[in-house]
Amino acid sequence: MADVKLPERASVLIIGDFNVGKSTLIKYQRTKKFDDTVIPTMEIEPSIISVLVNGKKLNITVKDSPGMKKDSTKFGRLVFPEFQKCAVIFFVYDKTHRRSFDLIKDLKQNVDDLINRRMECFLVGNKCDKKSKEVVTLKDGQDRCSELKMDLFIEISAKEGTNVEELFHKAALRIKDMEFQFGSTKELPRNENTPKSCRC
Ligand SMILES: Nc1nc2c(ncn2[C@@H]2O[C@H](COP(=O)(O)OP(=O)(O)OP(=O)(O)O)[C@@H](O)[C@H]2O)c(=O)[nH]1
Ligand SMILES: [Mg+2]
C-alpha cells in the first residue's frame, strides 16, 4: 500500500502576560485536572494535545510561551520564530488582572506588524471561576475582540475546566478547515483575504 502522507500540521501558540494561566490551561487539557504546582515558563514548550473532532482524535501541537511584558525583548527573540509555524494564537489574559488585559492590545499589534499571513487569533479570558475578584467583564472581552478584529472570544477556567475542551476543539476545527482549504497548514497564504470583522 502506498504511503499516505499526513499534512504537516501547524501549531497553536499561547501567549500573554505572566501568571495568566497559559501553562495551567495546557495541563488541564492534557490531564483534565487542575495542577497548582506549575512553575514559570522560561522557553517555548511544545506539547501534543489530542482533541476529538467529529468522533476522531486529532493531535495538535500546542506551544506554551514565557509570560511577556510590554515591549518585551523575549517577544522578538523567542516568540517571533513561532509565528511562522502557527495557525492559531491564543491571546490569554487573567480576568482578575487588568494589566494582563491591556497587554493584549500590544501583543495583537505586534502580531499584526510582524505577520502578514493567514492565522486565527483567539482572545481567551482565563480564571472565570474567580468571580468575586473579577475586574475584566465579559462585555470588556467581547468589545476588545471586536475592536482588535480577532476571530473568537471565549472565557474559561483552567481550574474548573470551564470551556477548556471547547476552546481546543474550536482551534482544532479551524486548523482542519485551513488544511481543507489550503491542503496543509505548513505554509499558510498571505492574509489579503482575512476577514476584517470579529466572528465571535
Ligand atoms: N483560580 C484560578 N487559578 C488559575 C487558573 N489558571 C491558572 N491559575 C493559577 O494561576 C497561577 C499562574 O498559572 P500559570 O499556568 O503558571 O501561568 P502562566 O501564564 O503559565 O505563567 P508564566 O509561565 O509565568 O507566564 C497558578 O497559581 C495557577 O494555579 C484558573 O483558571 N483559575
Ligand atoms: Mg507558564
Image: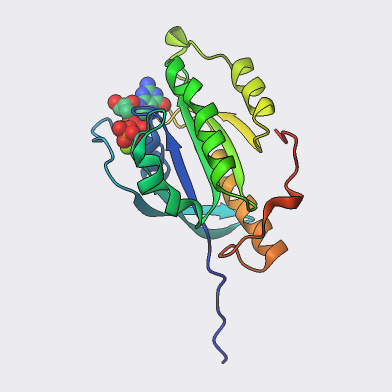
Residue in the foreground of this view, choosing between 171 and 147: 147
Tell me which image quadrant ligand 1 sits in: top left
Residue 33 visible here: no
Residue in the foreground of this view, choosing between 111 and 126: 111
* Image colouring: rainbow
State the residue at coordinates (61%, 49%): 119
Q: Is residue 59 left or right of residue 77?
A: right
Q: Position of residue 34 (x, y in %)?
A: 34, 33
Q: Position of residue 47 (x, y in %)?
A: 37, 53
**In the rendered view, would you say 42 is above or below 191?**
above
Q: How many numbered tags mark residues here?
A: 0
Q: Position of residue 103 (x, y in %)?
A: 47, 25
State the residue at coordinates (35%, 34%): 67
Residue in the foreground of this view, choosing between 17 and 60: 17
Residue 74 visible here: yes
Q: Quadrant of the C terminus?
A: top right
Q: Position of residue 195 (x, y in %)?
A: 75, 43
Q: Is residue 73 left or right of residue 187?
A: left
Q: Is residue 33 left or right of residue 137?
A: left
Residue extending farthest top: 132
**In the rendered view, would you say 197 is above or below 83?**
above
**In the rendered view, would you say 94 is above or below 38?**
above
State the residue at coordinates (66%, 20%): 143
State the residue at coordinates (47%, 19%): 95
Q: Quadrant of the N terminus?
A: bottom right
